Amino acid sequence: MSIVIPAHNEARVIGRLLDGLLGAAEPGELDIVVVPNGCTDATAQVAASYGPSVRVVESSEASKAAALRIGDEAARGFPRLYVDADVELGTADVRALADALERPEVAAAAPSRRLDMTGRPWPVRSYYRVWTRLPEVRRGLFGRGVVAVTERGHARLAALPRVIADDLASSLAFGPAERTVVASAAVTVHPPRTLADLLRRRERAAAGVEQLERADLDQAGGSARTTPSDLLAMLRREPSLAPHLAVFLSITVLARARQARRRGNYTAWQRDESSRT
């Protein structure tokens, strides 16, 4: 199995991820490629400190898309995992994803999502209480920081254009029968730490969706758009969500309004630094 980790100034968190990946791994079981790109911190040195278990391929260009391409060229095997540096994933989770990809119809897989809400303010907790219940968020591979593919699935991803919402594009590239969320694997995701951080992240997400729709891709997985009927059905099932739904809608509307002011600009979008704190 190969694991490709694009890493831009991730010295604070890359060790956390590598500790989990290698914690119970057998010698030679995992081919881990870390691609520090445009780094001005010690990301490469931290990754290199793990010895031959981790191969470090540096790039001077600060670009996730370029880092993924470089990592792909260096990777040796399949299944292949693409993992964001700011999440946490263990050896057992990697094995569970590989097992899921043994099914002949499955080309892509992702772990279940565990959100670390420690220290998050109530608007952030409220937003995610609704977001995690959205049908496409439950079914899709996006928003997890991990996508695993077979060699056939990799060919599908390689044909995609490089876009902001790369994980969403990866999810929509596969039909429902071709992708799976693996309950026996779990990734820890660190949500934004403040409301301002959340707004910036949702603004970026709105731009990513717009860019995908303008690209007019052939999306086997359909659309990830949330409809009013989805929200109404959720509210009927859980009336106690009403105040959280109000927070969710307010943040969504505000983020889309902010994004609309720079519509068509897909180059100036920054990542959420608070997940690295």
Image (spheres, rainbow, N blue to C red):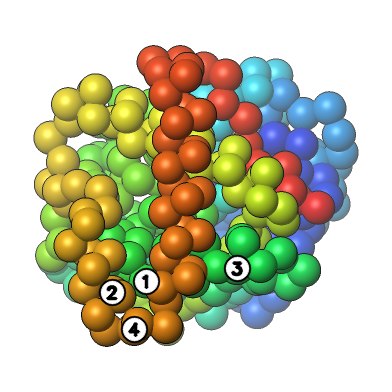
In this rendering, the label closer to the viewer, 4 or 3: 4
- Label 3 sits on what residue type? Arg
- Per the image, the residue denoted by label 1 is 133
Q: Callout 2: helix, strand or loop?
A: helix
Image location of residue 211, percent across then percent down: 33, 26
In the rendered structure, which disc, 1 or 4, sits on the residue that comes first in sequence? Answer: 1
Disc 3 versus disc 2: distance between alpha carbons?
17 Å
Residue 234, which numbered label?
2
Residue 205, which numbered label?
none
The quadrant holding residue 110 is bottom left
In the rendered structure, which disc, 3 or 2, sits on the residue that comes first in sequence? Answer: 3
Left or right of residue 190: residue 4: left
- Asked whether the residues under the numbered discs 1 and 4 touch, taking CB atoms below 8 Å apart as contact, a structural biologist would say yes
- Asked whether the residues under the numbered discs 2 and 1 touch, taking CB atoms below 8 Å apart as contact, a structural biologist would say yes
- Per the image, the residue denoted by label 4 is 238
Disc 1 versus disc 4: distance between alpha carbons?
11 Å
Which residue occupies 32% across, 29% down?
210
- Label 4 sits on what residue type? Glu
- Label 1 sits on what residue type? Arg
- Label 2 sits on what residue type? Met
